[in-house]
Image (tube, grey):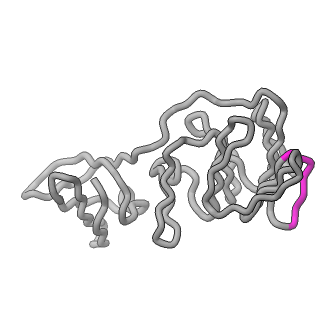
Amino acid sequence: GLVKHKEERDENYVISLEDPTGEIQIVIPKNLGEKLSLDDVVAVSGRINNKILFADRILYPDIPFKPVKYSLESIKVAFLSDENKADANYLVYNNRIEDKIKNKTYEITNPCIFEVGDVVILLVSGYDPLDVLRKRYVNIENSDFIIETPPDILFIDRDINTNYKGISIVSKNKIIDLKTRDVQSV
């Protein structure tokens, strides 16, 4: 269902969860409910007592496992702070992409999704990358950015470099080679 209301009470959160069949009140322990936001789509399990669900587990839509996708040729993409430059085919900043192959600059927004050599790249700044992938959306200024196509690479502004379900998560001031998925610092 869809989280319609969230209220903190003592050591719990009380939320209203709505689906096409109606609405239910759910009591969720703080440790489970802290990351819940209004309009999140979740599945909740637990026990029901007096028409109230006492949750013990929350599931998000999440990104499915996917095979790692590589480009056929060595294409280097750098995700950079505004003051940095790098020896790469594409320089990605928070507000633009500099395509060194075509010698063009493209204006972008946060978040945005784009393709380079058949590799899908998602850029998201200011959010926990695992929350973004699990929830499959980002809410920025009361506007939802839905992640319909799971990315192959996620560029983020936090110092995390890892893989999640076949998706490379790459932080700022790093260069990734799309043919090998090797990541190096600028």
Q: Residue furthest right?
A: 87
Q: Is residue 70 covered in magenta?
A: no
Magenta range is 83-89
Q: x, y (%) of residue 20? A: 20, 53
- Give the tally of numbered discs: 0
Q: Is residue 36 left or right of residue 47?
A: right
Q: Is residue 102 left or right of residue 109?
A: right
Q: Residue furthest left?
A: 50
Q: x, y (%) of residue 42? A: 33, 51
Name above or below for residue 13 compared with residue 166: below
Residue 23 in which image quadrant: bottom left
Q: x, y (%) of residue 101? A: 88, 45
Residue 159 in which image quadrant: bottom right
Q: Is residue 53 left or right of residue 178?
A: left
Q: x, y (%) of residue 77? A: 80, 46
* Residue plotted at (80% across, 63% down): 81
Foreground residue among 145 and 8: 145
- The kind of secondary structure the magenta stretch mainly shows is loop
Name above or below for residue 135 compared with residue 30: above
* Residue plotted at (82% across, 29% down): 73
Name above or below for residue 58 compared with residue 94: above
* Residue plotted at (30% across, 66% down): 13
Q: Is residue 159 left or right of residue 38?
A: right
Foreground residue among 127 and 118: 118
Q: Is residue 84 covered in magenta?
A: yes
